[in-house]
Amino acid sequence: MGHGHGPPEAIRHRVVGTDSIEGRERYELLTSLVVPRPIGWVSTYGADGISNLAPFSFFSAISATPMLVSLSIGTRRGVAKDSLRNILDVHDFCVNVVTESQLEAMNQTAADLPPDVDEFTHADLPVAEAESVRAPYVANCPAVFECTLFKVLDLEGAGRLIVGEVKAVRLDPTLSFVEGSTLVECGDLRPVGRLGGSLYTQLGEIRVLRRPGS
């Protein structure tokens, strides 16, 4: 009779209770583990007509029909960030997909600038007007979502969760689709993902895994 194997020894995890750490520590822990994250590079007009551009890494796709995306936008020193105030005032915005060639410019727009400073000018970025919503977009960005406000969720001190309905998707002619689909070729798009701290990731090896049974 052979000897069976006993149950594996439990892994000794380090358990961090979120109530035991400060806000900055929570942010660092969360954003270094939920990776890589897409970057929502959000462009808006204020009620005064001044354009604004800022990146957010709490950004996600949440539904295809209707096509919905979400942005979690916090406050800065207790005051609503320009992007949040503009979306609540105007109800329209664009999300520009950050690509490798725009990484440095995107980082410039993350600067803490006064509300009357145009980030497009600050980062020397070309600006154009969306067609289906009242919002500017980065003219040389290869993929842009034109969005209108769908729903707002108050996060009780942590800012607001903005759900936007995508009214149109702008695609540069250099982007191609996978044959027989509307899947944009990643090799054409060259997207950038956010990691923890000041780290970003670019496309590395791409693996193809078919879903079982497909």
Image (cartoon, rainbow, N blue to C red):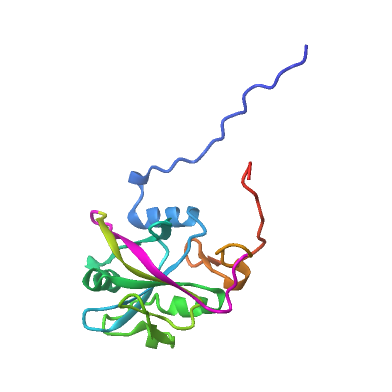
User: Residue 115's spot in the image, x, y percent?
Assistant: 26, 80
Left or right, 80 with reference to 141: left
Query: Residue at 60% across / 29% down in the picture?
Result: 9
Q: Considering depth in this image, is 198 or 86 the residue closer to the camera?
A: 86
Q: Is residue 167 magenta?
A: yes
Q: Quadrant of residue 208?
A: bottom right
Above/below status of 26 relative to 148 = above
Q: Considering depth in this image, is 165 or 75 the residue closer to the camera?
A: 165
Which part of the image, by quadrant, shows the C terminus? top right
User: Residue 155's spot in the image, x, y percent?
Assistant: 26, 54
Above/below status of 44 relative to 11 = below
**Residue furthest front as drawn:** 180
Is residue 159 visible in the rendered structure shown here? no
Q: Considering depth in this image, is 136 or 204 the residue closer to the camera?
A: 136
Residue stretch in magenta: 156-178
**Residue furthest right as drawn:** 1
Q: Quadrant of residue 84?
A: bottom left
Q: Is residue 194 magenta?
A: no
Query: Residue at 39% across / 61% down in the picture?
Result: 69
Left or right, 101 with reference to 57: right
